Image (spheres, helix red, strand yellow):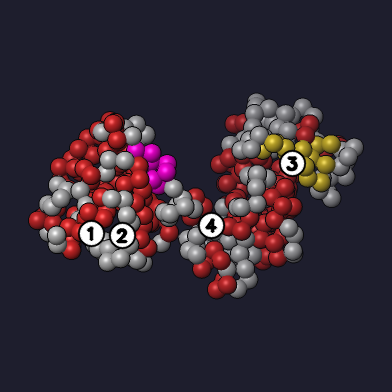
């Protein structure tokens, strides 16, 4: 038995082979004959494409990404060599996925790029399992975070950062505005999400105990904040309003204070404030204040559990992803390539 056949036999027996794995190559570098082998890449892709066409909630860009990544995976499988038709149970697929992760880890791809390729391959085996129901593949076990790269959801969001100078410059602009501007800045400074700011009601303010109860639509819970120092009297609160934040435009005169503003309204406020400062070219969003608040508390030595109570996170795992060290080189987020800056 040749060495290749021996290796293939080991693989069929569910033994993971992590030595001498073939490298991943770009699809454009593969000649037409490279699409043939133990797997007919063209035929498999055509069948997979038909499956994607009948799948719901998958856009054209996502389909193109799936097909491109799966094509690369199938070409790699031909070089292994391993026929996809031999993936007859969960254990075999798990071992193949572990080998694939090893190959991906040998590239210079970032964590989230590798995770996207795994997501594509998982979708392919969803199709494969659909075509071979008797195989009963458990995709959750096969693509477990214990042995593959998983995506950091925050990496796909623009993580704009602000410093004290930018923060104070924006505060000056908010202070020049009306009571509405002051309230919006107050909640942003406390790291509130836009969904929370737009739903704060006038009756959520407890003047007796000098606190504000803020409902969190994302978690379904409530958090408390002290009332701002400038709120010295109940007189500034319009008791005819339902919502504390209201749209001041003329077209909203009839529903002012009785209908909550859109989250875009908060976003536009921030853009208008920053545009009036010397930092008008700094690209920030309302979420930047949330990051700034968490990072400030981290630098002051506050515990992750206390910060999560203020930020409204259900746990402490996200805190490290929002914060960053003064020295970026020693920041674990930077070193582990968890967030795209």
Q: Is mark 1 on a helix, strand or loop?
A: helix
Kindly indicate whether the residue at mark 1 contacts the one at mark 2 (C-beta within 8 angstroms).
Answer: yes
Q: Could you tell me which residue is drawn at 34 percent across and 38 percent down?
A: 137
The structure residue drawn at horizontal position 31% and vertical position 47%, both measured from the top left corner, is 92
Question: Disc 2 vs disc 3: Cβ atoms closer than 8 Å?
Answer: no
Q: Do the residues labelled 3 and 1 touch (CB within 8 Å)?
A: no
Judge depth for marks 2 and 4 and give the one in front.
2
Is residue 74 one of those drawn in magenta?
A: no
User: Is residue 227 shown left or right of residue 15?
Assistant: right
Q: How far apart are marks 2 and 3 (CA)?
A: 52 Å
One can see residue 47 in this view: yes
Q: Relative to 261, is 266 above or below?
A: below
Quickly name the residue at label 2.
17
Q: Label 1 belongs to which residue?
A: 7
Label 3: which secondary element: strand
How many angstroms separate mark 3 from mark 4 (CA)?
24 Å
Highlighted magenta segment, given as a residue range: 137-143
- Give the residue at the far right of this rendering: 208
Of callouts 3 and 1, the N-terminal one: 1
Earlier in the chain: of badge 2 and badge 3, it is: 2
State the separation of the CA atoms marked 1 and 4. 46 Å
Of residue 83 and residue 227, the one placed in the foreground of this image is 83
Question: Contact (CB < 8 A) between labels 3 and 4?
Answer: no
Residue behind mark 3: 223
User: What percent of the width, then of the height, locates residue 291?
Assistant: 62, 56
Q: How crowded is mark 2: few (under 14 residues within 10 Å), some or many (20 or more)?
A: some
What is the C-alpha distance between the residues marked 2 and 4? 39 Å
Q: What element carries label 2?
A: loop
Give whichever of discs 2 and 1 has the lower sequence position. 1
Q: Where does label 4 land, which residue?
A: 159
């Amino acid at each position: 038995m040749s060495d290749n056949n021996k290796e293939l036999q080991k693989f069929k027996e569910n033994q993971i082979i992590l030595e001498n794995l073939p490298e991943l190559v770009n699809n454009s570098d593969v000649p037409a004959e490279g699409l043939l082998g133990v797997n007919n890449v063209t035929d498999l892709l055509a069948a997979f494409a038909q499956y994607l066409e009948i799948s719901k909630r998958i856009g054209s860009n996502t389909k193109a990404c799936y097909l491109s990544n799966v094509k690369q995976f199938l070409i790699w499988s031909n070089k292994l060599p391993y026929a996809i038709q031999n993936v007859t149970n969960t254990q075999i697929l798990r071992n193949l996925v572990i080998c694939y992760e090893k190959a991906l880890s040998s590239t210079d791809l970032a964590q989230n790029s590798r995770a996207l390729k795994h997501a594509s391959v998982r979708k392919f085996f969803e199709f494969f399992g659909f075509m071979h129901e008797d195989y009963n593949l458990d995709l959750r076990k096969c693509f477990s975070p214990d042995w593959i790269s998983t995506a950091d959801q925050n990496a796909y969001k623009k993580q704009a950062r602000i410093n004290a100078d930018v923060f104070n410059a924006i505060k000056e602009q908010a202070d020049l505005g009306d009571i509405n501007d002051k309230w919006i800045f107050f909640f942003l400074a406390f790291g509130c999400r836009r969904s929370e700011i737009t739903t704060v009601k006038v009756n959520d303010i407890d003047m007796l105990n000098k606190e504000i109860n803020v409902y969190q639509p994302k978690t379904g819970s409530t958090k408390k904040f002290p009332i701002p120092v400038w709120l010295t009297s109940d007189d500034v609160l319009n008791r005819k309003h339902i919502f504390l934040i209201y749209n001041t435009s003329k077209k909203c005169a009839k529903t002012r204070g009785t209908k909550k503003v859109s989250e875009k309204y908060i976003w536009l406020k921030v853009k208008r404030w920053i545009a009036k400062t010397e930092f008008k070219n700094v690209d920030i969003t309302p979420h930047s204040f949330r990051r700034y608040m968490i990072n400030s508390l981290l630098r002051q030595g506050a515990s992750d559990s206390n910060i999560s109570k203020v930020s409204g996170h259900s746990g402490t795992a996200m805190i490290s992803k929002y914060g960053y060290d003064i020295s970026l080189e020693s920041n674990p987020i930077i070193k582990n390539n968890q967030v795209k800056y």
